[in-house]
Image (cartoon, rainbow, N blue to C red):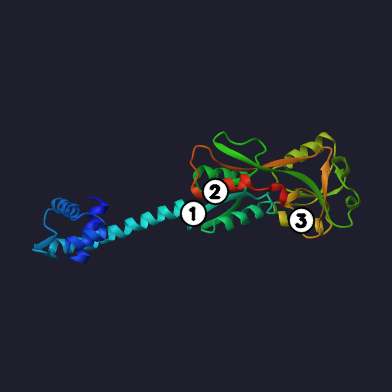
Amino acid sequence: MELDQARYFLATCEHLNFTRAAEACNISQPSLTVAIKKLEDEFGGPLFHRDGKRILLTELGQRLRPYLSQMAEQAETIRQAASDFRLLRQVPLRIGIMTTIGPMRLSGLLARYQQDHPGVELGVHEGSLSELQTQLDAGDLDLAVLHAPGGHSPVTRALPLYRERYVVIVSPGHPFERQNTVRLEDTDQNAYVDRLACEMRETVMTACGQNKIELYATFRSEREDWVQGMVMAGLGFAFMPEYSVTHAGILRRPLIEPSVEREVCLVNMAGRQLSPAAAAFSRAAQRYRWGAE
């Protein structure tokens, strides 16, 4: 049985006239009657009593009508869902963002995308690098915004978005406030707020060890808001990506000698076709003017 045959049957039930049913289905009357005959052959009995130009449903036709009606409704629901998916209407887009990546640069892109595609239901999920990679692989995320210090997996495709410097953040009144930049050696023996969740932490700690720089950790936390709050409370300085600083009043000074930076990328699974919503987001990210925030 074909869906069109069910549609022709239901139209005939409604009009009880082959000619009007054919007109409603935009086909010829012979084509409609042939389709009805095929259904009758398949179901093993007549669906309509034919009395000249007047037709009535048989008992078999009456029994089958609600099932064929339900099937037609489900088919229309499926067609509508496919159309919505293709035309970006009421479709979800799941984007993972690494917890160490702040909102300052991404918020503009997300807002622009939502304005251009109001039918997309945009969901942002935070996670560590390993969590996002696992969720991408499992299909729980469409895209992920992340930095991979050791390089990206060969089964993923990475689109570079922007580069981000690491800065030293301090509260007003800290000795570093008087400096335009902070050398790594300037931090020696200074009170320090340790960002435990940072994927670049080991890089910075290795540089400190190589340069025989000792840091006195007064506070440790995996939460960005707590780190910034403790810096503002005067517990010491912290290393932080420049676009992750959100606390009002906090001071930033570029870290130099050596400078440290990271590349933030939009990542998806290389062997999978992007959904229309994800493909539109990838194009928007490529067109976005990252230096114009």
Q: What is the x, y in percent for residue 48? A: 13, 61
Measure how far apart labels 1 and 2 are at the Cα level.
9 Å
State if disc 1 and disc 3 touch (CB < 8 Å): no
Residue linked to disc 2: 280
Asked whether 51 or 56 is in front, the reply is 51
Position of 230 with respect to 134 (left or right) is right
Q: What is the x, y in percent for residue 94? A: 54, 52
- Secondary structure, mark 2, is helix
Mark 2 Cα-neighbour bin, 10 Å: few <14, some 14–19, many ≥20: some
State if disc 2 and disc 1 touch (CB < 8 Å): yes
Position of 155 with respect to 195 (left or right) is left
Is residue 131 at least partly visible in the picture? no
Residue linked to disc 1: 88
Is residue 250 at least partly visible in the picture? yes
Residue displayed at 27% across by 53% down: 3
Of circles 3 and 1, the one toward us is 1
Residue displayed at 65% across by 50% down: 99
Measure how far apart labels 2 and 3 are at the Cα level.
35 Å
- Secondary structure, mark 3, is helix
Residue linked to disc 3: 228
Residue type, label 2: Ala
Residue type, label 3: Gln
